[in-house]
Image (tube, coloured by chain):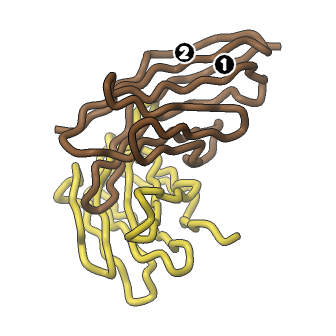
Amino acid sequence: AAGVIQSPRHLIKEKRETATLKCYPIPRHDTVYWYQQGPGQDPQFLISFYEKMQSDKGSIPDRFSAQQFSDYHSELNMSSLELGDSALYFCASSLDEGAGELFFGEGSRLTVL
Amino acid sequence: GDSVTQMEGPVTLSEEAFLTINCTYTATGYPSLFWYVQYPGEGLQLLLKATKADDKGSNKGFEATYRKETTSFHLEKGSVQVSDSAVYFCALNAGGYNKLIFGAGTRLAVHP
């Protein structure tokens, strides 16, 4: 079965650079979520989109932005990167009526040097 | 606000030992409850879920019962294996846009 696809899997950037992460949800899933997991931490909700509109917002820094496109894939853009942005970024997708079951990708590991 | 509290790890067990990982929650509504597992270097995988009080979720020998009276969703397994070594996250979804709120995670290490 198709799963959530994230790219790139690994990314190394310098401070103050910009990074873009991509997420391709499971076909027919209409909701996409982004989570950030720091080393040894639990995943923290950043932002979600339902039918290409932002549906909820969590602890996402102003330096970050995200959108969901017409084909339902989503991109997380991170600018003015800081050392503290080094983390594993997960994308998840669900059906709006899926009783809260989220399907996670394998994550994109961002390292900021 | 809504929150999840898990027992701190790491939990270290010998193979075939009994496992319990405690999880309690605070929510204003009637949340769905989940256990996710994260193997080293991998993403989060749904282990089991329960959507209403007294439901029991089960998968791969793991079980958890939704206890509304004690606001708990403890994870149990009768006989753990080395391959169960991972980090286990308890989570809730209190409705709305299906946003999950995770506990801090409990690392389980099983030794032969």
Give how far apart the Cα atoms at labels 2 and 1 are. Answer: 7 Å
Q: Reply above or below: B15 against A38.
A: above
Which callout, 2 or 1, points at the residue further toward the start of the chain? 2
Residue occupied by mark 2 = B10
Foreground pick, B109 / B23: B23
Chain holding disc 2: B
Q: Colour of chain B?
A: brown
- Helix or strand or loop: what does disc 2 sit on? loop
Tag 2 and tag 1, C-beta contact below 8 Å: yes
**Number of residues whose C-alpha sits closer than 10 Å to that of mark 2, classed few (under 14), some (14–19) or many (20 or more):** few
- Look at 47% across and 57% down and name the residue there: A102
Chain ID of residue with mark 1:
B
Report if residue A38 is visible in the image: no
The kind of residue on which mark 2 rests is Pro
Does A33 appear above or below B30? below
Q: State which quarter of the image contains the N terminus of chain A.
A: bottom right
Amino acid found under the numbered disc labelled 1:
Ala
Chain the render paints yellow = A
Q: Is residue A54 above or below residue B70?
A: below
Find residue A64 and report its horizontal and vertical position in percent. 25, 61
Of residues A35 and A31, which is closer to you in this image?
A: A31
Q: Quadrant of residue B6?
A: top left
Q: Where is residue A65 in the image (x, y as percent from the top left)?
A: 25, 67
The residue tagged 1 is B109
